[in-house]
Image (cartoon, grey):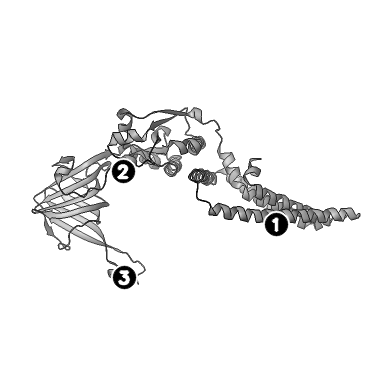
Amino acid sequence: MRCIKNHPIAFANFIAIELMGLAFLMSVYDGLHEDWHFALVGLSFVIGAAIFIVASIIGIIVYIVKKAKAPNQQKQEKDFVRELVVEYMQNTKYCALYWITMIIFTPILPILTVHVLDNYFLGVTVITLGIAIWMIRTSKDAMEQRFYKVRNTDEFFNITSGESSDILNPLYGDYVHVYRYDSWNEHKKDFICNILKWEKALGAKINCYRISHDYLCQKYKHEYHPHFSNLILIPFSQFEPNSKNGPTLRKAFDRLSLIRFTELVDLKYGHKTSLDPHYYIHSDKDATLIPFAAGITNSSTLGGELRISIDRACGAEDKSKIYHDCLLVIKNAQPTGADCTEKPRQNDYIEAFYADRDAKIIDMIISRELPPDSCDYDNDSFDDTGYIHLRYSFDDMQWYWDGSCDTGKTDEIFSKISTRT
């Protein structure tokens, strides 16, 4: 009944095809002698054809109207969750059995019956074709219905207030997914509970934390977009993922969630362009950071110092330690090497970085957009980015930054997902 309700036009076409197939069967039946028998055959075919034509016209009109309507966010989110369900079920045994059944039933059944039924082949073919079309049209509904094993999902969620530094501080750097409560409660909680059930990772309770937009802004001293209001936070580590179910769960949760909590907090960093060390919160004269694949936001030579501001860097000893809005001050920087006439500039990217405090040498590989007239459009391997190797000798160097995050917990989860057997 649910499939019929969801696809009334497709169901009408199904009935129409079946009526026409039935008419073909009756037309070759040897027992037809009376006039009303032939009238019944013709009536069945005419009714089936009429239903098919009318349903097809209505279907075209409905399609055009839907395309003309403005997109509904709630429906879009519901459809997105449904696509995730279908995508997941396509890799299960149920999906394989579903399509094997249709393949066997549709083309093979008429062939097997051709010698038995002889003249009835056309009618059987039309009837089975109608069934096949209906199965294809409602396949997503079948997958969705099979996916949702757990119906009463509310009992599995333990939602508590997350508006506490004792809760949020440990979550920063951990692998935590964020959802808006309205869409989470409407569409996503059922998906979360059931995919955990399928992947044998559903425990007695799923711990969630709820925070408001006001608290988020107050806690991190940043005016977040109103879209980030009334949020649900779900730590991924509580599901104890392994190499078997971890990649599947990670992909599903990443696509389903609004953003990761660490990334949400990091939105407060604005890619600072200041070259004044006094405008940065933290510093350590012995720190050595590595700005790998980092964007240069500003650069200048001031008083014999080369100053470069970048959006992010990581620790030289601990790659899981991430630093945001950084400034590198190189005292008495003297360019050496092949590209010594070049200088780092805004919108360049640092692809590789090496600093040796003892030898007082800094090496950088920088990628830079080339002007359009310098590009070789005739080359199949055309690349509009140029790479520059910069080397400096220096007297001293010092790093400044506005914030840092230890992503060790996230890295540990990724390691378990990829290496555990």
The picture places residue 128, in percent across and down from the top left corner, at 71, 52
The local secondary structure at tag 1 comes to helix
Left or right position of 19 against 267: right
The picture places residue 110, in percent across and down from the top left corner, at 73, 54
The picture places residue 342, in percent across and down from the top left corner, at 17, 62
* The C terminus: image quadrant: top left
Disc 2 versus disc 1: nearer the observer: 1
In this view, the residue in front, 176 or 114, is 176
Disc 3 versus disc 2: nearer the observer: 2
Image quadrant where residue 181 sits: top left
Disc 3 versus disc 1: nearer the observer: 1
Image marks 3 and 2: residues in contact by CB distance under 8 Å = no
Is residue 32 among the parts visible in the rendering?
no
Q: Which residue is mark 1?
A: 53
Q: Which residue is mark 3?
A: 376
In this view, the residue in front, 91 or 217, is 217
Where 414 sits versus 348, above or below?
above
Left or right position of 245 against 8: left
Image marks 3 and 1: residues in contact by CB distance under 8 Å = no
Q: Give the mark, 3 or 1, whose residue is nearer the N terminus.
A: 1
- Amino acid on which disc 2 is placed: Leu
The picture places residue 355, in percent across and down from the top left corner, at 17, 50
Q: Give the mark, 3 or 2, whose residue is nearer the N terminus.
A: 2
Q: Which residue is mark 2?
A: 267
In this view, the residue in front, 220 or 29, is 220
Instruction: Rate crowding at label 3 as few (under 14), some (14 to 19) or many (20 or more) other CA atoms within 10 Å.
Output: few
